[in-house]
Image (cartoon, rainbow, N blue to C red):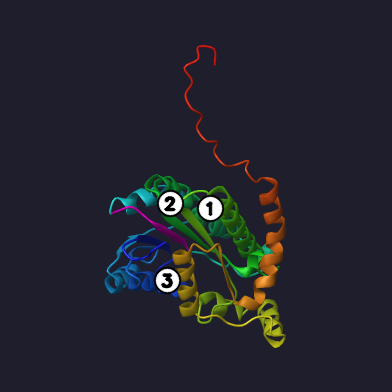
Amino acid sequence: MEITGTRVLITGASRGLGRDLALGFATAGADVALVARNADALAELAGLTGGRAYPCDLADRAAVRGLLARVEADGPVDILVNNAADEGIGRFTELSADTLEFMVRLNALAPAELTRQALPGMLRRGRGHVVHVSSFAGIVVPPMLATYASTKAFLSHHAVNLQFELKDTPVGVTRVELGEIAGTDMMAHGRTEPALAGMFERMYRLRLNRQLNSAEITAAVLDAVRENRWSVRLPRRLSPASLLADVPRRMTWLLARGLTTPPAAEPRSTSLYR
């Protein structure tokens, strides 16, 4: 999909990877619609990108239900980038009920609901792309990230299912699975949790992982949208875990081949007895 001239909605755009994605899409010629809670940071970014800011709490059910209509009042969304998330590092037994609900709403329900709102218009217009920014945490079992990892598993699985449902349509879906990103709040918070920090250090010593930077992720996402690629996996050395997780998913694709394709319309018969 050509990015120049498209309208891109990016959640979690006020900082970190979301901010870099917004700058990248804007540089590529897109009109960016910026969503996050921090209105001041969004306004500043809108000034840099020439986009529009739509402050919104994505954990607020009513706000999410009305978000796409609010954004599309200024023009249709061609590309939806579901990037916003919170990690909630710590033992699950110490997680409050409010924090648990917040994370599930932000990390899983909000992207699914925004995608549900965006797809009918994309299909009607005959073009569109959805990007789910997930994590390798949704495949492996990192300590002290039970809820975050579970929501990312939801996001990855949701993306793969949508790819199957939409494979015969002009709308693409890209699943982005990432390792640790340098300079992010999650990395800073994770380094204060001994078990999680210790796991990362072991992975680095064994050369199973490396730190990513937002610029390489942004470049990979832009290329994936342009080329309608199903997956972005960074760092690549963690890709085997994702590929193994895809094996049962692809097997069910094969078993269900042809069962989800809408049947071709039959010629209208003039028979009175049909």
Secondary element under disc 3, as helix, strand or loop, is helix
| Image coords of residue 264 (percent x, y) | 52, 35
The Cα–Cα distance between marks 1 and 3, rounded to whole angstroms, is 21 Å
* Residue at numbered disc 2: 64
* Residue at numbered disc 1: 109
* Residue at numbered disc 3: 21
From the viewer's perspective, is residue 219 above or below residue 175? Answer: below
| Image coords of residue 35 (percent x, y) | 39, 62
Question: Residue at coordinates 46% horizontally, 49% vertically from top-left?
Answer: 61
The Cα–Cα distance between marks 2 and 3, rounded to whole angstroms, is 21 Å
Which picture quadrant has residue 15? bottom left
Q: Which residues are magenta?
A: 75-82
Question: Residue at coordinates 46% horizontally, 64% vertically from top-left?
Answer: 225
Q: Earlier in the sequence, mark 1 or mark 2?
A: 2
Question: Residue at coordinates 67% horizontally, 45% vertically from top-left?
Answer: 256
Q: Given the image, on which type of amino acid does mark 2 rest? A: Val
Q: Given the image, on which type of amino acid does mark 3 rest? A: Leu
From the viewer's perspective, is residue 267 above or below residue 250? Answer: above
Magenta region includes residue 77: yes
Alpha-carbon neighbours of circle 2 within 10 Å: few (<14), some, or many (≥20)?
A: many
Q: Nearer the viewer, residue 94 or 256?
A: 256
The Cα–Cα distance between marks 1 and 2, rounded to whole angstroms, is 9 Å
Asked if the residue at tag 2 contacts the one at tag 1, i.e. Cβ–Cβ closer than 8 Å, the answer is yes
Q: Nearer the viewer, residue 16 or 261?
A: 261
| Image coords of residue 67 (percent x, y) | 38, 52
Left or right: where 144 falls relative to 15: right
State the quadrant of the C terminus. top right
Q: Given the image, on which type of amino acid does mark 1 rest? A: Leu
Left or right: where 99 falls relative to 47: right
Question: Residue at coordinates 66% horizontally, 75% vertically from top-left?
Answer: 238
State the quadrant of the N terminus. bottom left
